[in-house]
Image: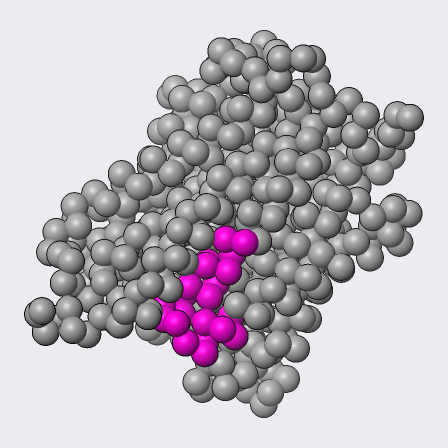
Amino acid sequence: MTLAAAHANTGDTAWLLAATALVLLMTPGLALFYGGMVRTKSVLNMLMMSFVSIALVTVVWLAAGYSLAFGKDAGGGLIGGLEHAGMAGLGPDSVQGTVPTLLFATFQLTFAIITAALISGAIADRAKFAAWLVFVPVWALLVYVPVAHWVWGPGGWIFDRLDALDFAGGLPVEITSGASGLALCLVLGPRLGFKKDAMRPHNLPMVMLGAGLLWFGWFGFNAGSALGANGLAAAAFLNTLAAGCTGLLGWLFVEQRRDGHPTTLGAASGAVAGLVAITPSCGSVSLLGALVVGLAAGVVCSYAVSWKFRLNYDDSLDVVGVHLVGGVIGTLLIGVFAVDTMTGGPEGLLYGGGFGQLGRQLVAVIAVAAYAFTVTYGIGKLLDRTIGLRADEDHEHTGLDLTVHAETAYDHGVLGHGAPVSAHSVPSAQKVKPQA
């Protein structure tokens, strides 16, 4: 056994192997979550956009993404080098902390995969699948990889110079995907019938199943980010559970007061909102802080998803309202609720840390959101003017499942016809009463 191999901790390695599998499972879970939220004519297309992201991002990550994100800083804290392109120099004995470097790289890959897949929810029902195949690898290299280096990479400016905190991905995953989703839905324009047709989720049990798989995988996402089987992982695990619960309850409370009925879609969305918000803060706040973070996300995001109707941007499956808004809430509240027993030093406003940490969190949020939005908008415009980003109108009307994939999800007609309308699927003035 080499000296390097002797430094790998078997317990930490075993936990990170499990956590990596859990995070990878989140993308199929997201596929079900999104698939249930669209209409029957685009279910398979929605599933495919998530599943193909696994393959596309993996190839890009192994070729250059990992090296650019986690390689030695190439200057200015903006991007890493290419010394590990093609995973060069990373043999089985190479160690990152107390785990094999190859495992660490794979764990980080699963984060990149789901971040790209999240964006698809903002452009559901109307994006060309061929354009998506081009967009994902380009976006991963130009947007996700640089932001991951800023936040987690050696010498990254947010991590090394700004000293903003992000334990498990509020900036690279949630805010980046939300801002990018907003950019793409602005490039594409609204779906046919937006604000006119009641675009119901066609399969709410599928949505709930997808949300459950996401919640299950999120324990690997957050607790796995401790990179060890230790007390910090345990605290992040409990914080994740707590915030998901209060997020769910907060969303249902708003629905009950606003609409007179709590919905299954609201429960699923509230849990996800709480999990989104706790992602950056699960390793920085106490259990009390986690409960507040989740509750704040559940309440605020339940209102934020309706902004699209007032501001006229068609974020199909509420990526902006849940992931961007929830990510901002969780990242900023670190500056309020961070405790030194979790962070090892930095404290939030309520624990005597002053406004300093809150200010650093705000700078990081603005920088990442602005960068992700601007670059994604540029990529989207370029694709739209070259190969075309939006599906043909007749394809969109017929449904992308049949016109793009030559398949249909169901053989026995349209299902879910009598499903209740979500509180955030259509404007309140256009809600349709469920059929008896």
Q: How many marks?
A: 0
Q: Where is 31 relative to 10, above or below? A: above
- Residue 57 to residue 430: above or below: below
Residue 122 image offset from top left, x and y in percent? 57, 37
The kind of secondary structure the magenta stretch mainly shows is helix
Which residue is pictured at 69% across the width and 40% down the height? 308
Q: Nearer the viewer, residue 389 or 261?
A: 261
In the image, taking residue 193 as reference, residue 400 lies left or right, namely left
The residue lying at 14 percent from left, 63 percent from top is 93
Front-most of residues 422 and 99: 99
Is 379 part of what is drawn in magenta? no
Residue at (74% x, 25% y) in the render: 416
Quadrant location of the N terminus? bottom left
Name of the residue lying farthest toward the bottom: 352
Residue 145 x, y percent position in the rendering: 33, 51
Task: Answer with left or right where residue 411 lies relative to residue 128.
Answer: right
In this rendering, position of residue 377 left or right of residue 89: right
Q: Tell me the magenta residue range.
A: 216-236
Q: In terms of depth relative to the viewer, which is nearer, 351 or 213?
A: 213
Kindly indicate the quadrant of the structure image that contains residue 333.
bottom right
Which residue is painted at 28% across and 45% down in the image? Answer: 61
Relative placement, left or right, of 42 versus 128 is right
Q: Is residue 370 visible?
A: no
- Residue 246 rendering spot, x and y as whole percentages: 70, 63
Quarter where residue 32 is shown: top right
Residue 279 picture location, percent across and down: 52, 62
Colouring scheme applied when the structure was drawn: one colour
